[in-house]
Image (cartoon, rainbow, N blue to C red):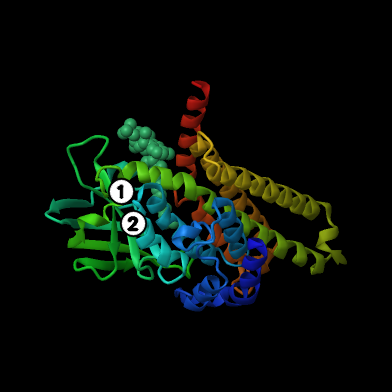
Amino acid sequence: MWRERAREVAEKVVRPNAAKYDKLQEYPWDIKDAIAKAGLMGVWISKEYGGQGGGVLDLCICVEELSRACGGVGVLYAVNALGTFPVMVGGTEEQKHRWLTPIAKGEKLISFGLSEKFAGSDAASLRCNARREGDYFVLNGEKKWNTNGGAADIYTVFCVTDGDSKSRRISALMVEKGMPGFRIGKVEDKMGIRCVPVVEIHFDDCRVPAKNVLGESAGMGFKHAMATLDKARPGVAAQAVGLAQGALEYAQVYAGHREQFGAPISSFQMIQAMLADMATKVEAARQLVHVAARAVDTGAPNVSKLSAMCKLFATDVAMEVTTNAVQIFGGYGYMRDYPVEKLFRDAKVTEIYEGTSEIQRIVIARGLGRDSHQ
Ligand code: CAA
C-alpha cells in the first residue's frame, strides 16, 4: 500500500518537477505538501502520536519510491525520520506527543544536528555546548551539514552539557526555529540533492527550556545519536536503491531505443551484461535494506551491523549503477538534458552522509567482534 501511494506522488508530482528544483536549488514546498497530503509524513510514527503506525520498513519503501524519481526529495522526506528518531528513542511521553505529532501530521518539519566543522566521522568530538542556567540551557556554537535546515521548524541538536564526563558528555536538545540566539548561516551550494537545503546553524546564547532536553535527563545524547543512526541508515540505503532503480529503468529504455551499427544497443552483449549486473545488484541491495529494516522494527540484537551493512552495500550499488547508466547514455548521459546525470550526482552523497562508507565498515567490524563474543 505504501509503495503504491508513494509511487503515485512520485510519478504525479516529483518526477515532473525534479529537474526544475535541481536547477533552482529551492525547497519544493508543493512536493512536501503532496507527500503530507498522501499521509506519508507519519508512516514511521506510531498511531498514538498521530502517525500511521508503520515502521522503518514502511519508511524505506516510501523513501525508495520517492528517490526513484528524485534523490533530493527522497532525503527531504527521510530526514524527518532522522530528526524524530532521537525523540522516539529517548524522549519522555510528553516530549513524544509534543514533537512527533506535528511531524506525523505534516504540519512541521524537523532537522538533525550532529555534525560540526571539526566533528564529522568522529561525532563524539563535537564542541557545541550548553550550560544550565535555572530552567534553561544556554546554547553556544555551530552545527554543519544540517539537511532540511531553514525549512525545518524543530532541530534535534547534540551538544556538550558536561565537558568533564567521559560517557555522559553529550545531550540532545530540542531547539525550535525562532528561539532567540538561533540563526541559519551559510546555505551550501551542492553537487546533488539540490532541492533540499543543507545549512550551517549558529547558536549565540540561545536559551532553550531545560524541559527540551531529551529524556529530561542530560548526558544520554551520544547514545541517542548512535541508536538513531542505527534506525536511520536503512533509510539512506533505501534512497540509494531508489536512485539506482530509477537509473536502471532510464538506461534500459534508452538502450532499447538507441540505435548504433544498425541495431538497438540493447542487442549488444556488453550492454546486456551491464544491465543484468545493474539489475542484480539493485535487487540484492533492496533485499538487504528490507532485512535490516525488519531487524530494526523487530528489535533484533546487533542491529548496528545490519544497518551499516545495508547502507554500505546499497550506496556503493547506487554509485556503480548510476555511473553505468550515464555510460549507457554515452555523450547524452553527460548532459543536463537527460535525467541520469542528476541521479549520479544525487547518489554520491549517500556514500557520505549518516556515516561514510569507511565508518560503516568500522561499525560492521565492531559488530562482527560482538557476534564472535556471543
Ligand atoms: N547504540 C547505542 N549506544 C551506542 C551505539 C549504538 N549503536 N554505539 C555506541 N554506543 C555507545 C557505546 O556503548 C559507548 O557508551 P559508553 O561510553 O557508556 O561505553 C558510547 O556510545 C561511545 O561509543 P564508541 O566508543 O563506539 O564511540 P566512538 O567515538 O568510537 O564512535 C562511531 C563510534 C561509530 C565512529 C560514531 O562516531 C559514528 O557513527 N560516526 C559517524 C557519525 C555519523 O554518522 N554522522 C552522520 C551525521 S548525520 C547526517 O549525515 C545527516 C544528514 O545530513 C542527512
Q: Is mark 1 within 8 Å of ligand 1?
A: no
Give whichever of discs 2 and 1 has the lower sequence position: 2
Rendered location of residue 148, percent (x, y):
41, 65
Q: Nearer the viewer, residue 130 or 197?
A: 130
Seen at 84% across and 65% down, the residue is 264
| Amino acid on which disc 1 is placed | Gly
Q: Residue 215, labelled with which disc?
A: 1
Q: Is residue 325 left or right of residue 114?
A: right
Q: Residues within 10 Å of mark 1 (few under 14, many from 20)?
A: many
Q: Which residue is mark 2?
A: 95
Seen at 70% across and 49% down, the residue is 283
Taking the view exactly as shown, the residue that stands out farthest to the front is 48
Rendered location of residue 72, percent (x, y):
51, 65
Quarter occupied by residue 111: bottom left
In three-dimensional space, the C-alpha distance between marks 2 and 1, rounded to whole angstroms, equals 8 Å
Q: For numbered disc 2, what is the local secondary structure?
A: helix
Question: Do residues under tags 2 and 1 come within 8 Å of each other at their CB atoms?
Answer: yes
Image height of 359 relative to 142, above or below: above
Q: How many marks?
A: 2
Answer with the quadrant where ligand 1 appears in the image: top left
Using the rendered image of the protein, determine whether residue 93 is visible from the camera's viewpoint: yes
Rendered location of residue 197, percent (x, y):
41, 67
